[in-house]
Image (cartoon, rainbow, N blue to C red):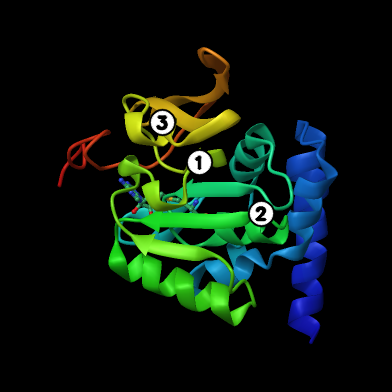
């Protein structure tokens, strides 16, 4: 009881100090961050640091992103209730849970089976049962459920993968960190009547997107 009350307070602090003051304005995004228990998405060992202002390890050399980055991506993706959202790189499942809390129809793809399995258990345990998960190469998108109003890629790519781009709905938005290891820029691609418009947002650092239309394998020591 005492513990969960203190996690609630930590969530309110996170929303005020890390998100609102840095410019996250969308109330539906902020409310989702107040609702979803981030401490349930990190390994036991890191639980007391779950609401810190940074990424945390989740095993298999992967991380759950810094709360602010997750919020910036979700806000940029313009997620509305009932929208179909493709989440590429399920990782811990935290971002998928936030999207579900915003009442989107969530389709989430992860390449590492163990992470996908853990995320599935967490999401089910917290009642986010409507999230659809798949173990696959997310650079191929998820053709069966396309088109998507929003696609969020939670890993860094050297280029925009073509299949997810094709799976965007009219006016749909794809948010992706593009660049080299350890230094990328968040890009927002909007599908327009006759093509795509690309806007650059902020600098960021993500783990690599590994697949047919991104890095062929881990760029650094593997
Ligand atoms: N959004 C996640 C964090 C993502 S970390 C969260 O909320 O926890 C990036 C994830 O992308 C990692 O789990 C990594 O295994 C996964 N990934 C990398 N390349 C991928 C690909 N081609 N398809 C699907 N997942 C991929």
Residue at the spot 37% in from the left edge and 42% down from the top edge: 207
Which image quarter: residue 123?
Answer: bottom right
Answer left or right for 169 relative to 59.
right
Name the front one of labels 2 and 1: 1
Foreground residue among 43 and 155: 155
Please tell me whether mark 2 sits on a helix, a strand or a loop: loop
Can you say whether 202 is above or below 206 in the image?
above
Distance from mark 2 CB to nearest ligand 1 atom below 8 Å: no
Separation of marks 2 and 3 at Cα, in angstroms: 20 Å
* Callout 3 crowding tier (Cα within 10 Å): few <14, some 14–19, many ≥20: some
Using the rendered image of the protein, determine whether residue 97 is visible from the camera's viewpoint. Answer: yes
Nearer the N terminus, badge 2 or badge 1? 2
Q: Mark 1 or mark 3, which has the lower sequence index?
A: 1
x and y, in percent, of residue 12 in the image: 82, 57
Residue position marked by numbered label 1 in the rendering: 147
Q: Residue at x 63, y 36 (%)?
A: 77
> Which residue ends up furthest to the bottom in the rendered image?
1
| C-alpha separation, residue under disc 1 versus residue under disc 3 | 8 Å
Residue topped by disc 3 = 166
Work out whether 87 lies above or below 168. below
Q: Is residue 47 visible?
A: no
Instruction: Give residue 98's quadrant in the image.
Output: bottom right
Which mark's residue is nearer the viewer, 2 or 3?
3
Q: Going by the picture, which residue comes out furthest to the left?
A: 222
Q: Earlier in the sequence, mark 2 or mark 3?
A: 2
Vertical position of residue 128 compared to residue 60: above or below: below
Give me the disc on residue 104.
2
What secondary structure is marked by label 1?
loop
């Amino acid at each position: 009881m005492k513990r969960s009350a203190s996690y609630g307070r930590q969530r309110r602090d996170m929303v005020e100090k890390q998100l609102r003051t840095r410019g996250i304005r969308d109330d539906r995004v902020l409310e989702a961050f107040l609702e979803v228990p981030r401490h349930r998405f990190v390994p036991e060992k890191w639980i007391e640091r779950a609401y810190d202002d940074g990424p945390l390890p989740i095993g298999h050399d992967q991380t759950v992103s810094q709360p602010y980055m997750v919020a910036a991506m979700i806000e940029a993706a313009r997620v509305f209730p009932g929208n179909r959202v493709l989440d590429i790189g399920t990782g811990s499942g935290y971002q998928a849970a936030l999207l579900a809390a915003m009442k989107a129809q969530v389709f989430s793809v992860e390449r590492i089976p163990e992470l996908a399995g853990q995320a599935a258990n967490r999401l089910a345990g917290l009642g986010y049962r409507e999230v659809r998960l798949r173990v696959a190469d997310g650079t191929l998108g998820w053709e069966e459920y396309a088109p998507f109003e929003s696609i969020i890629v939670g890993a860094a790519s050297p280029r925009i993968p073509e299949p997810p781009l094709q799976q965007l709905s009219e006016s749909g938005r794809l948010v992706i960190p593009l660049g080299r290891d350890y230094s990328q820029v968040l890009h927002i691609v909007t599908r327009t009547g006759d093509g795509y418009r690309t806007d650059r947002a902020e600098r960021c650092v993500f783990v690599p997107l590994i697949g047919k239309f991104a890095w062929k394998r881990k760029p650094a020591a593997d």
